[in-house]
Image (cartoon, rainbow, N blue to C red):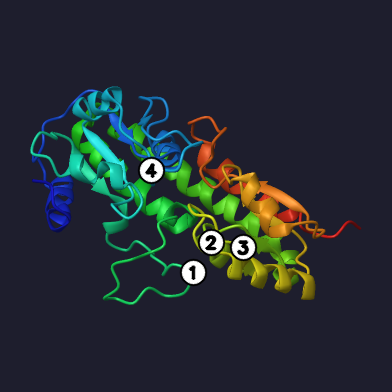
Amino acid sequence: MFKRILMPFLLSLAILPGALPALAQPAVVSSIKPLQLIAAAVMDGVAQPAVLSPSNQSPHHYVLRPSDVALIDGAALVLWVGEPLETYLANLVASVDVQAVVIEVAGLPGMHLQAPGGGILPSDEARYDTHLWLNTANALLIAERLAVELARRDSANADRYSANLDAFRELLTRTKDQLETRLAPLAAINYAVFHDGIAYFEQEFGLRHQLVMVPDHENQPGVRHIMQIQQMIEENPPACLLEDINTNPATVVTVLRDLPVKRIPIDPLGHSLSADKQGYALLLTRLADAFLECLPAR
């Protein structure tokens, strides 16, 4: 069975000469859209990675369809974050019937993991903020591992994967530099988030939200919590509220009542983006664009 403790061994096979036979254009399946965007950059010009969970659905509660199982059965590589995010995949990737190498990206050596709500994750803490793709160093680490795995299975395109990885690395550097400059004015702006799902992005670019509207975006907040948030907003109004495009509007209306708060949609899953070599950088850029809408008009 595929177990988390076996992943370092499985991944190490990718660097052993002759450990695996070369396969033409290995099929890659990603659990969520952001991982597909990273894979698309590495596989540009060779093949198109597939994705399981639609971006307009929560990966926490997605239910696999027969077509999804068929995709996994035919895959050489499967990318997923880990059981805390995609609980629907946990049993399947542990199955003896899965022939693909399953890469649990949260378990990759060097992966930067944050504690839920931000901050450093204690070494003995198993629960982490699952939105790890919103950190550019993590995205590069995922791309590097995937490029190695692909090259070992598709030696004919090894040079292409390597060149694509170099291009992705350069794109990330340019994008990060641009966003650091653009987002610098927001360091002093008070803003609110619907739920705490963009902490990796905030930490990387020196941003800090004033308050979180709901502690668990999957559930309706309690009356006491709603009253506390309403009082905080009245006493110190945020410049805006950043809310996921999949947020339940009724929940926001219930909390805000008639409080004059500017609402700005964000899409940390890249719902409308094309899976191509620019997709991941565009995901970050559009998220930054949403933040910049918080800036007061000049």
Q: Which mark is residue 196?
A: 2
Between marks 4 and 3, how big is the CA–CA gap?
A: 21 Å
User: Which disc number belongs to residue 213?
Assistant: 3
Q: Position of residue 19 (x, y in %)?
A: 8, 41
- Name the mark nearer the viewer: 3 or 1: 3
Q: Secondary structure at mark 4?
A: loop
Residue designated by label 4: 61
Tags 2 and 1 touching, CB below 8 Å: yes
Q: Are marks 2 and 3 in contact (CB under 8 Å)?
A: no
* Residue at the right extreme of this rendering: 298
Q: Residues within 10 Å of mark 4 (few under 14, many from 20)?
A: few
Q: CA distance from mark 2 to mark 4?
A: 18 Å
Q: Which residue is mark 1?
A: 117
- 116 versus 139 height, above or below: below
Is residue 182 at all visible to an observer of this figure? no
User: Dot 1, crowdedness within 10 Å: few (<14), some or many (≥20)?
Assistant: some
